[in-house]
Structures are given as structure tokens and as C-alpha cells.
Image (cartoon, rainbow, N blue to C red):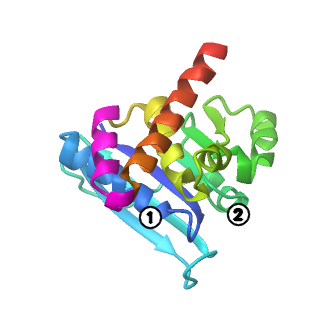
Amino acid sequence: MRREFRVAGFGGQGVILSGYIVGKAATLYGGQHAVLTQSYGPEARGGACSAEVVIDDTPVDYPLVSRPDCLVILSHEAYSRFRDSLAPGGFLLVDTAVAGSVLADEAARGTAALHGIPATEIAERLGRRIVANIVMLGFWTAVTGYVSRAAMEEAVRTSVPPKTVDLNLAAFRAGYEHAGVMEAAA
């Protein structure tokens, strides 16, 4: 079953690393096939940035994402640029700390699969704002189920600098658990 995933924000948020981790988890630790493509502006930090991953049970015959089943938004600019590409009924995951106004727009649209998480705020509570992308990956894993938790945790463990493994795994778990808290509250 083909699933298309796009994460978008700006340079310096770990957008490309997020896509890499998802693809690695799906292929090396999840027994699936995946292809990663990426796009970023010429700026080292602050420019528009996105990563797209196609995940499938069979070899991926077309690597480009056209209508993502899941769109992860890490900035308001990313929302403006990519919102209309989301497949009908797809998941829209938003970091409310940096793009909170998106929730009101989507509520007005009646988006059913809309999920907000204060990923940046959670990362700051863990001591490093820079792991907000990993918080979001934990949340994404719990909400979508595209890749198993164990596969994602192993991909995080083997993709980040050794000195940051514990912090990144804590960030992943915080995002994953946030989805459970939301579900219990609903």
C-alpha cells in the first residue's frame, strides 16, 4: 500500500533529517520500501525546506509525492505553500507552537484528520528546541501508524549524533505519548 508523506518547514528545523529517519525506519527496520526526495532554498538556515517520503510494501515505481496522505507542518509558510497538496482525508499534523493559527483555518474547513501538537514547546521543556522535529516524528508515528514505533526509535537512535541519542529518544517518546494523551482526552 503506497503512502505519501511530506514534512515542511524552514532550514535549521531538521526537516530533511526527519524525512531521512522516516525512510530509514521504513526500509531498514520496517521491512518496507521507501524513497526520499528533498527540496530546500539556497539559505543554510531559514529558507523554505521540505522532505517527501514514499513508503510502499512493494518497490516504489514513482518516487515523487504529489498528494501526500500526511502533511507535517513546522512553519506557517510551509502551511501556505503545501496545504492544498494534501490528499482528501489525509492527516494534517501541525506544530502549534510555530503555526498555531493553522488550526483555526482548518477547523473552519472541517478538516477531519487535523492534529496539533506544541512540538517546539515540548522540545524546549526537554532542554533543546532543536529536537522539535523528533517530537513531531514521535507524534506522527503514533497518529498515522505508517511505521512501527520500534522501527522509528531504532532509526532515530542510529541517525543522530551519539551524544544526543538520549535527548532525541526522549523527544520521540514525548511526541508519541502526547498522541496518547490527546486520544484519552477525546
Give the magenta-colored segment's residue range. Answer: 148-163
Residue 16, disc: 1
- Of all residues, the one furthest to the bottom in this rendering is 42
Q: Residues within 10 Å of mark 1 (few under 14, many from 20)?
A: many
What is the CA distance from the residue labelled 1 to the residue labelled 2? 16 Å
Please name the residue shown 52% across and 53% down the image: 133
Residue 98 visible to an observer of this rendering: yes
Residue 34, disc: none
Q: Quadrant of the N terminus?
A: top left
| Kind of residue at badge 2 | Glu
- Image quadrant where residue 144 sits: top left
**Residue 161 appears at what percent x and percent y?**
35, 62
Please name the residue shown 27% across and 44% down the image: 154
38 left or right of 114 in image: left
Tell me which label, 1 or 2, sits earlier in the chain: 1
**Residue 98 appears at what percent x and percent y?**
72, 54
| Kind of residue at badge 1 | Ile
**Residue 94 appears at what percent x and percent y?**
64, 45
Q: Is residue 154 magenta?
A: yes
Give the prevailing secondary structure in the magenta stretch.
helix
Please name the residue shown 62% across and 45% down the image: 119
Residue 173, placed above or below residue 157: above
**Residue 84 appears at what percent x and percent y?**
64, 52
Judging by the rendered image, the residue that carries numbered circle 2 is 77
108 left or right of 15 in image: right
Q: Quadrant of the C terminus?
A: top right
Residue 63 visible to an observer of this rendering: no
Q: Is residue 127 magenta?
A: no
Residue 15, placed above or below residue 96: below
* Helix, strand or loop under label 2: helix
